[in-house]
Amino acid sequence: MSIAASLKATGIAEVIVFVRPDSGGAAAALGDGPSSAVLKHFSAMPFSRDAALLEALRADGPTAPASLAARNAAVARMDAGGDEPTARYFPNLGLALGTVNRHSLASLRAEPAVVDIVPAPQLRLIRPVLEAAATAAPGYPWGLRSLEIDQLHGQGLSGKGVLIGHLDTGVDATHPALDGAIKTYAEFDSLGVQVPGAVARDSAEHGTHTAGTLAGREIKSVRFGVAPGAQLASAMVIEGGNVLARILGGMDWMVGLNVRVLSMSLGLIGVQDTFLRITQTLRAKGVLPVFAVGNDEAGTSRYPGNYAEALSVGAADSVGRVADFSSSQRFKRQIDSMVPDLVGPGVDIISCVPGGKYKRMSGTSMATPHIAGLAALLMEAKPNKSIDDIEKAIFDSCQLLPDMPVSRANRGYPNALRALGLL
């Protein structure tokens, strides 16, 4: 919904405010310079989304059934004297998130420190289209073999020394396949406030599954991790609560850790520029954004995965066909006019789930960590190459397989060995 439409309907609107960098070239710290000038225009709104969430949290208490991890953290914080934040500032992204009325919106628009104001969306997980219990067999699964990831492993590449950002439903760090894979973990409660001292956990199964594809360690010759030597900066940001505040918190936290690549399997169907500046900021900070394009079939896509600045990933099966569910769409723009950029293994993908178990899942969510993991291997091999160089090598390594139409697969299917040779 546009800001004008939201103001007309409810009298308020949640907005993202992009803050002008200070004279040193970086966004100012909280309470200093441009950020302070922007935050003074925000105040608590009694009918805002955060206020409604806060009221529900207080009424439901710590046993509310939905999004227990995020809700319980918020309830505990409120019991300790916390309250609704009037606005949140994310210094590494150079933006603020808060709720405005017509008066405060006009004040913000007149503020010299403000670069742009856009409506705040609520992103959603791109859910798998298939889930089934599975047994992980020894050896490499079809996805890694088809990308020739096994060939890079044979050359001693594992992603060692590369930190991958992983924003999802969390992660079960106790799974044997993820032993040593989680370098750091963060959890953001229902209002998007980071939970102090959070212990790594998964509020569902999706996050552990994608983490396993990214960096799962070998166990008894089972090898489903693309970059088993890499480490993850993993955050629970979805689902439940103010999802946007949680995701922005996770992104800001991750950028501050200097991750090299971000794997993110979430988005909103449609075409909106809301996340465009954020995706551009990620690239400017040296982070390669690898985003799922969506599971909504041909003629659709999800943002931010459909931005030209994102490396967008669709899904293919083991015989080289683009999955029926995999999104694809053409755009009227000169650069990168088609999404996804490429397709990766996304059908019948076996990886770990909480409780030491394994599941088979299908979706562009499953394809995305394959490509992010490949980027990590290339970054280990060529640490001085830029993210643009890494992305170009992956793109140039792609080939359209016999059953892959351009309209569905764009560049086609990447090859890890060829990509390494192109760097």
Image: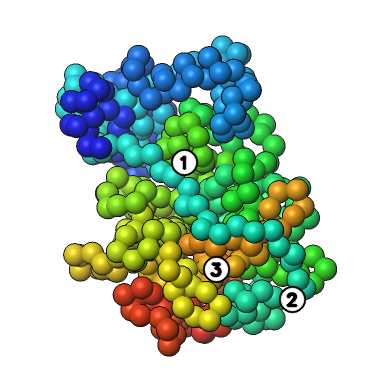
Residue 72 picture location, percent across and down? 61, 25
Residue 68 picture location, percent across and down? 61, 31
Question: Label 1 neighbourhood size at 10 Å, few (<14), some (14-19), many (20+)?
Answer: many
Question: In the rendered structure, which disc, 3 or 2, sits on the residue that comes first in sequence?
Answer: 2
Residue type, numbered disc 1? Ile
Question: In the rendered structure, which disc, 3 or 1, sits on the residue that comes first in sequence?
Answer: 1
- The residue shown at (25%, 32%) is 113
Q: Which mark is residue 260?
A: none
Residue type, numbered disc 2? Gly
Q: Which element carries disc 1, helix, strand or loop?
A: helix
Q: Which residue is mark 1?
A: 247
Question: Label 3 neighbourhood size at 10 Å, few (<14), some (14-19), many (20+)?
Answer: many
In front of the other: 33 or 350: 350
Q: Is residue 20 left or right of residue 29?
A: left
Q: Which residue is mark 2?
A: 139
Residue type, numbered disc 3? Val
Residue 99 picture location, percent across and down? 32, 25
Q: Which element carries disc 2, helix, strand or loop?
A: loop
Q: Which mark is residue 347?
A: 3
- The residue shown at (38%, 25%) is 49
**C-alpha distance separating marks 3 and 1:** 26 Å
- The residue shown at (44%, 80%) is 398
Q: Is residue 174 above or below residue 242?
A: below
Question: In the rendered structure, which disc, 1 or 2, sits on the residue that comes first in sequence?
Answer: 2
Q: Are marks 3 and 1 in contact (CB under 8 Å)?
A: no
- Can residue 412 be seen here? yes
- The number of discs equals 3
In front of the other: 304 or 130: 130
- In the figure, residue 402 lies in which quadrant? bottom left
Q: Is residue 295 left or right of residue 259?
A: left
